[in-house]
Image (cartoon, helix red, strand yellow):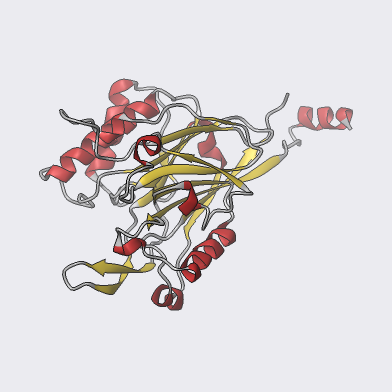
Amino acid sequence: MLRLVGLLMLLGLYTAPSYALTVATWNFEWLTLKTDQQAGLRHKEDYLQLAAIFAQISPDVLAFQEVDSPDALARVVPKEKYHYYFSDRYTALKSSSHSQQLTGIAVRKDWPVDDPKDLRKIALPGLFGPPSLRYGTYLVVTPPGHAPVHLLSVHLKSGCFHQRQSTSSCKKLSKQFRALAEWLADRDDENVIVAGDFNRYIGENNDPFWHKFNARRLEIGSNLPNIVNVTKNVRARCKARRYNWRTQTWNQVMYSRLVDHVLVSGPITAQWRYSFQYQFDYHKVMTYRLSDHCPIVARFEMAHVSK
């Protein structure tokens, strides 16, 4: 068999075995067991529906946002199949009586994982006290038989979805993109996936934030590899319900523009195959308390690493 493989390699006819890696990102909208958030009040049937959606996607890796605790996440992501890695902020905030919007990553069990410190710079530390924005949860995951993948789960500043940079929210978001560009530049030759809620339509043509993001990377090093947004052409049709605090009612909405994205850098860019948005069924949206974000899924065909 080895002789045959060697002959095929010489002839250029041998293709190394590959493995399909599925990465998803999902903002759960206040996934919490506490009762201080109206959007987080869910019943058993609601959690069962979320868990059923997750089972259909069945990702190898999930970048999650707006999760308060491992106990809340376990209602959706089975803890017997996945390890949970929460933002470093969880240690300081877990005893709070208020629900927290934490980032994190869930990884299939038995996969080697390194858990470096979070990307804290993205939380924009202020002059007084701890930063109020979310950290980027950072892991290095090694799928069986494959090269390590650097994963970052992010949840960026809201309020600057398509505007220029004159508002306070846009200025903060611009600083976050700058921090993200610098973090990526430090890993220029690695397999990198950044997934999460960017709160920005960066996949749309001529977005100034996307241009400034890439310009900052070129300032750091002109030979840096391209960053590919593998969700750029994903069609957004996310049906959801939003709670209106003014009228204290639930309103039906349709989100047709994408704020959840998956960015890819390094050798893994050539291994991306397709991406899509899992779209909720209308009946389930109106019957159950799901989320105001639909999951985003990206599929990669990973080549085996020869030993």
At x 33% / y 51%, what residue is drawn? Answer: 99
Q: Quick one: quadrant of the N terminus?
A: top right
Instruction: Give the position of the C terminus as an image quadrant.
Output: top right
Q: Position of residue 215 (x, y in %)?
A: 27, 31
In this figure, what is the number of numbered marks?
0
The location of residue 86, given as percent across then percent down, is: 45, 40
- Decide which of 209, 29 is in the foreground and name it: 29
83 relative to 291, above or below: above
Residue 281 image point, x, y percent: 46, 73
Left or right of residue 198: residue 143: right
Residue sitting at x 68%, y 41%: 18
Q: Is residue 285 above or below residue 149?
A: below
Left or right, 20 with reference to 238: right
- For the point 45% across and 74% down, the residue is 284
199, above or below 213, in the image: below
Left or right of 222? Residue 280 is right
Position of 184 relative to 273 (above/below): above
Residue 32, image quadrant: bottom left
Residue at 16% x, 29% y is: 128
Extreme residue in the left direction: 166
**In front here: 26 or 234?**
26
Q: Which of these two is toward me, 27 or 70? A: 70
What percent of the width, then of the height, locates residue 112? 62, 32
